[in-house]
Structure formats: C-alpha cells, structure tokens
Image (spheres, rainbow, N blue to C red):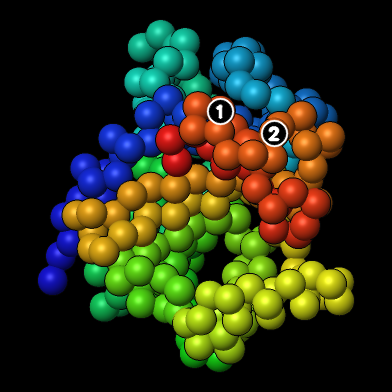
Amino acid sequence: MRFMAGSEVADWRRSRLAFVLSAIFFCAAVSAQSQTGLPEGNGKALIEATCAQCHDLERVSNARFTREDWQITVTRMVAHGAVLKDNEIAVVTDYLARNFLGQPAVVIPGAEDAIEKALFAAPANLRPAATVIRWKPDQTYETLKKGTNRLVCYDRSGFPLEPPFSVECTSIGNLERVAQNLKFEAAGGGDEKKTQALFDALEKEGTRVKPEHGSIWHQFRGADQARARMHLTVAVPGGTAQSTGLPVTRDPMNAWIMDAGTSSAHIMLPGR
C-alpha cells in the first residue's frame, strides 16, 4: 500500500506563512554558532547575510543534515525567495554540509507506509531529517525513523477526540506534553467535556506539562486524507494579550492567542 505524495496534498495549503515558519528552522540550524562565530570558510558570509533576512530567532535548532538534505533545504529556500545566485547555492550547500553534517535517517524495515503517512504533516523541507514515532496504548512510543533534526511526527488517526485521519508534527521537546495529552484523552473516553475537565484539573494543580515556548505544531486532519486540512499553531505557554501583543478573540484575518494565560496558550494563525 502506498499513499499519494503528501507534498501534493498539503503543501498548497501552507502558502507564504508556512514558508516563513520553515525558514526559521533553516536559519536556526546555523544560528547558535552564528552567535559565537560560524566556522571560517567560503560561504560563511553568504549564510550570515541570508539568515539575517529571517525573523529573530528565540530558539536554536540542533539540526544536522546530510549533504542531500542541505541541498533540498537551500534549493527550497531559494525557490521561495531567499536571495542566492546559482553559484552561491553550491557554495552555501558545500559550507553547510561540511560544517553541519548529519547522518542519514535510520528507518525500521517495513514501516515505510506508516512513516510516509506521518510525514504528511511535516513541512516539505524538514521531512527528510524528521523523526517518526508510533505511539503505544501506554503512551510510550517506538521510533520508526530516527531523524537528525528536532521535528518529530506521528499518526493519531482514530485516537480519542481525533478524526479518522490525523497526523501531527512538533518539536521533539514536546513529546512529554503529547504523552500527557494522550493519557488523559484516553481517560476521558472520547467525551470532550470530561477530557477538558481532566486537563483543567491538571492546570489547577500545576502538573500540566508545558510545551516548548515558540514551538510549532503542524496538524493535518480530516475525515480522510483527501479531505484533510493543514492547521498550524505556535505554542506560547502562559502567554497573554499583554505579553504577546495579540488579541484573545478570534480574528480570521490576523493572528490571535487562544487559551491565554494557561500552559495551552497558543497563537492561532490566519487561514490555519
């Protein structure tokens, strides 16, 4: 069994906003060392100039890509507006592959279909190096594909409160939060009000696991793959209108903050 290409199903829904979010990951892959000085070499100045065009980076990615994955990443960034000449693309790719080289992803044999499905929620330029896991009933997981960046993807199709088709990707640092979500969603037995009451109790007790601040949650959900829709949010636990400068009421044209003041506070993106 083979699923249709995820890029053809989901990528058109992402538009320019998704590119900006993906570009953050690209710049973050080299930002930490940029702050202390990138390794000297041909391409350093180009990378510093290119990443300087991205948004300010509050978090650092520990991504390490293979040469092929760096080529895919650089080419995609250029296709979406990064200013690099043809000869500069090769220079930048060589520099990144030389200084930020990762190992090829390790894949469990026989898990290819499950991996492909889970990766539908991932931005195309991050898929090759993303980790894919499969959740077990006890909220532990097995790794189907060991990646080299900080993005982790998994299938939630048919889980309590989830539609028949549901895949999700987020920062690997959010897995404890996801495991807690799964535990109490299962305890709620598919009853939305009961499940929310359980989460409210955790919030009141101060035992709700917080997501990484600024982490992006990519969800691709629907009645089936063909009718699934992409939804992106940015976690800002504890965020309020005052701390973010965003409204707390739904705005279809602009970003706004949902669940303000709680561990679940997150930025809702227009059209997502």
Which quadrant is the N terminus positioned in? bottom left
Q: Can you name the residue that lies furthest to the left here? A: 1
245 to the left or right of 102: right
Which quadrant is the C terminus positioned in? top left
Mark 2: which amino acid? Pro
Determine crowd level at label 2: few under 14, some 14-19, many 20+ residues with C-alpha closer than 10 A: some
Label 1 vs label 2: CA separation?
A: 9 Å
102 to the left or right of 238: left
**Residue 11 against residue 220 in the figure, above or below:** above
Q: What element carries label 2?
A: loop
Mark 1: which amino acid? Asn
The answer to which quarter of the image holds residue 81 is top left
Callout 1 touching callout 2 (CB < 8 Å): yes
The answer to which quarter of the image holds residue 11 is top left
Q: Position of residue 187 (x, y in %)?
A: 58, 89
Residue occupying the point 56% across, 85% down:
188
For this rendering, which residue is in front, 237 or 161? Answer: 161
Q: Where is residue 72 in the image (x, y as percent from the top left)?
A: 37, 35
Q: Is residue 126 visible?
A: no
Residue occupying the point 33% across, 37% down:
13
For this rendering, which residue is in front, 97 or 131? Answer: 131
212 to the left or right of 65: right
Residue occupying the point 15% across, 65% down:
2
Q: Determine which residue is flagged by label 1.
A: 254
Q: Where is residue 220 in the image (x, y as percent from the top left)?
A: 37, 55
Q: Is residue 77 visible?
A: yes
Q: Determine which residue is flagged by label 2.
A: 247
Q: Where is residue 125 in the image (x, y as percent from the top left)?
A: 41, 40
For this rendering, which residue is in front, 212 or 198? Answer: 198
